[in-house]
Amino acid sequence: MNINTFLDLLCNEIKYKPIRNDIAEELKNHINEIKQEYIDKGLESNKAEDKAVEQMGNPKEIGLKLNKIHKPKLDWKLLIIMIIVLGFSLLVTFTRSSNISQNNEINVMIKYIAFMVIGIILSVICYFVDYRNLLKHSKKLFIIASLSIIVSITFGTNLRGVSHFRIGTYMFSPSVIAMPLYILSFVGFLENINKESREKVNINIIKIIISSIFSLYLLSLIPSLVTAFIVCLTYLILATRKLLQINKNIKRNIGLLWGVPVVLIFISVIIMVNSPLGLFRLNRITASFNPESDPNGAGWIGTNQNLIINSAQLIGESENMGNALNIFDEGTNYALISMLAHYGWITSGLMILIVALLSIKLIINAIKVKDIYGKNIIIGIATMFILQSICNILMNLNLGIQANFNIPFISYGGANLIANMVCISLVFSVYRSKNIILKKMK
């Protein structure tokens, strides 16, 4: 039996096709080394090859053993957490729909379930696609994200000062698409930095800086300063990790990396405060932490949140729903306070707990994954989810600034749900091959 026949029989037993070529190449090199030893002992090439292959053993038995080792693994723990999270998502949507007419209630639930089904289908497809293929499309992802914002601003519909895409009667913000795509493209750009070539590092760093500033500028035009803030922090965390990996002038580079944005944000805040709308914005920030200072204006939502928080029961409706119940049921940002108003602290606490478990599981997955590119994808997605969740929970409990923060999956919205499900499917895709070392991943 020659080498090629041996490898074909062996690889046919390995179900995970992306690993076959790497295993075949590694075994071929090993067999050729054994073959060369026999040649050095005086055997002819053909006989030496036959001896080397025979020494390896039964190709089918070896293939079956390698198949067990390199079998993709489904992250069952994350899947269970996601099922519970989606259950809360349905409960939030049902709560919202129950306060409107019966016909609309049915339509809202049907639409949301339809979006969930679409999200599941796309997630399954994404799960079986090799996530490493995204690396070569990083520039395309960046262009798609940028065009989505530009097209929305130029041709979209303005809703409460924010540009939206309109599909029939349904509208959604381009940030739903742009936010994860920018983060994935940024991960790809970081991967292209070659630490062995000083010239290439400088060129790639310049490209990353320019693309980052451009993306944050576009995100702030939607306008969505909240989205820009989340993406900016995600960029900084990913870039910091890259600097630690390069291990060159760490203190100085990290100081510059974080120092420059902090200074720019400080200058921007000063400019905003001194702008014509500065007093209004400052009043909104102040009212977020002290709603009673303007109970009929910027602090109206916070005041009604306090009424619900202070009168909430362990189980069941709050004794004082306040005057903002309709706003809570119509606004995607106030899913948590709506749950508290309708079902009490236990249900709301469980919702916060499952969101925390999701965040912790994503962090654990990032630690376990061996592939640097896959690890950074999980870190980017996890950072995006965790920052949004923390800011939203604090905002709902009157402990943070009132802004357009969403809890991934929990805050209802069809486009948001689909985008978040596709993102989490990438985490599943990375995890399924976490124990499989491919040469492309090294």
Image: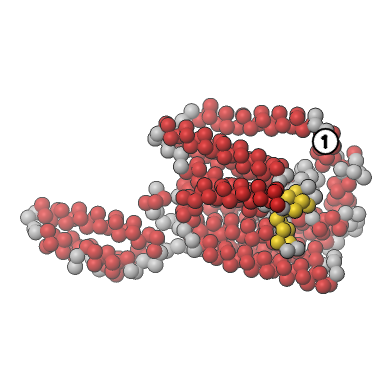
The secondary element bearing badge 1 is classed as loop
Snapshot quadrant of residue 101: bottom right
Can residue 72 be seen? yes
Residue at coordinates 50% horizontally, 41% vertically from top-left?
190
Can residue 390 be seen? no
Left/right placement of residue 287 relative to residue 364 reads right
Percent position (x, y) of residue 442?
Answer: 39, 48
Q: In which quadrant of the rendered image does the N terminus lie?
A: bottom left
Depth check: give the residue in front, 202 or 351.
Answer: 202
In this figure, which colouring scheme has been used for the structure?
secondary structure
Snapshot quadrant of residue 233: top right
Question: Mark 1 sits on what residue?
Answer: 277
Residue at coordinates 71% horizontally, 46% vertically from top-left?
222
Percent position (x, y) of residue 216?
Answer: 64, 40
Look at label 1 and name its amino acid: Leu
Percent position (x, y) of residue 386?
Answer: 65, 48
